[in-house]
């Protein structure tokens, strides 16, 4: 029988789950609550762990579903482009040298915001692929879609990111 | 520097055609300091992806709270200890069964009439020469191949008569 305990098998998942919940809810406090709920749920089902191939994938599925439930209640689907533009027009992004530290940091922030403007499925796919480095197969299992659909979501997401990023670049150039 | 390859990878990246290994190559490339101007814009994207893992995380106090909530953390460990002993018990039981079977199998080879253990058989073996010597007169034909078996029989009979 598989010996699993909370400390060694569930707790280490906290950061992966947090990032996923954060990506979906866009709220760190809520994300933390969701991770808590996810872990408690996992723990309560521990008598059925033997039936599961990957605890991590299972945990992420629970986490995502909980996050989506929260979303339905709060109605905040994704970040808006306005927020991204505000970020661009604040003073410290007006630096003359494009790639010094503060600006680089802002650019990273911009990327995060752009990803946050994507529809949830695309956002989650990007999160799981580009940040958590999961194979398409696992992402498909977590989202309960086909691998082909995962690829389509990633494709659309990356095209959007590329486009918006270029737009932001132009915006930055024209506004200085 | 071979930027052509990187550009190819980048095109595949936008098309969602890259493998995890290729994406890793892109990430590593963009984490360098020296990047050609035309590729520099994408640096933030890959830099973000690389940094997200280290920037977004929960603190140690989260661990404390979770463990307190779960509460059974200690009982879980106790349970696992007992559960860890179970396989040992099972193994011991299997060994016991094997030993019992082993003993049971040996039983046909050991009769009460016969000194059936290995030492006994050796005695019988020794008894061969004695038996043959004494009974050689009563045995007309004795072949070498039969020697052992006959000797055993004679030895047995000899033991019986002695008892």
Image (tube, coloured by chain):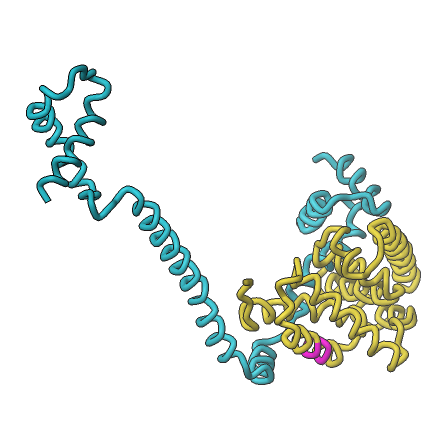
Chain colours: A yellow, B cyan
* Viewer-closest of B139 and A39: B139
Q: Position of residue B93 (x, y in %)?
A: 40, 60
| Vertical order, B154 against B146 (above or below) | below
Magenta part of the chain = A33-37
B59 lies above or below A162: below
Residue A119 occupies quadrant: bottom right
Q: With B11 as the anchor, is B128 left or right in this view?
A: left
Residue B82, position as x, y percentages in the image = 45, 72
Q: Compare residues A63 and B115 and report the one nearer the observer.
A: B115
The quarter in which the C terminus of chain B is drawn is: top left
Which residue is pictured at 88% across the width and 71% down the height? A78
Taking the spot 41% from the left edge, 64% from the top edge, the residue there is B89
x and y, in percent, of residue A173 in the image: 89, 59
Q: Is residue B92 above or below residue A22?
A: above
> How many numbered marks does the figure carry?
0
Tell me where residue B131 sits by quadrant: top left
């Amino acid at each position: 029988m598989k010996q699993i305990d909370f400390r060694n098998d569930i707790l280490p998942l906290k950061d992966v789950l947090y990032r996923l919940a954060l990506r979906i809810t866009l709220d760190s406090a809520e994300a933390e609550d969701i991770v808590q709920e996810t872990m408690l749920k996992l723990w309560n089902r521990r008598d059925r762990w033997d039936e599961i191939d990957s605890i991590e994938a299972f945990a992420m599925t629970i986490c995502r579903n909980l996050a989506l439930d929260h979303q339905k209640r709060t109605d905040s689907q994704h970040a808006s482009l306005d927020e991204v533009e505000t970020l661009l027009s604040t003073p410290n992004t007006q630096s003359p040298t494009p790639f010094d530290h503060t600006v680089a940091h802002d650019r990273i922030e911009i990327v995060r915001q752009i990803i946050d403007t994507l529809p949830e499925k695309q956002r989650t796919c990007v999160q799981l692929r580009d940040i958590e480095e999961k194979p398409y197969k696992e992402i498909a299992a977590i989202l309960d879609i086909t691998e082909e659909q995962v690829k389509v979501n990633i494709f659309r997401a990356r095209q959007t990111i590329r486009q918006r990023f270029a737009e932001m670049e132009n915006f930055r150039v024209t506004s200085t | 520097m071979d930027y052509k390859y990187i550009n190819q990878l980048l095109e595949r990246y936008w098309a969602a055609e890259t493998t995890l290994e290729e994406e890793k190559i892109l990430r590593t490339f963009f984490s360098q300091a020296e990047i050609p101007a035309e590729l520099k814009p994408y640096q933030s994207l890959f830099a973000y992806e690389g940094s997200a893992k280290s920037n977004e995380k929960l603190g140690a106090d989260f661990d404390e709270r979770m463990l307190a909530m779960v509460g059974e953390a200690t009982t879980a460990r106790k349970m696992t200890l007992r559960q860890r002993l179970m396989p040992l018990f099972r193994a011991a039981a299997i060994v016991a069964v094997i030993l019992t079977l082993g003993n049971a199998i040996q039983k046909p080879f050991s009769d009460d009439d016969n000194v059936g253990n290995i030492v006994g058989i050796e005695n019988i073996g020794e008894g061969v020469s004695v038996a043959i010597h004494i009974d050689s007169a009563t045995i007309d034909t004795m072949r070498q191949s039969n020697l052992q078996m006959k000797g055993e029989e004679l030895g047995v009979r000899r033991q019986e008569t002695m008892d």
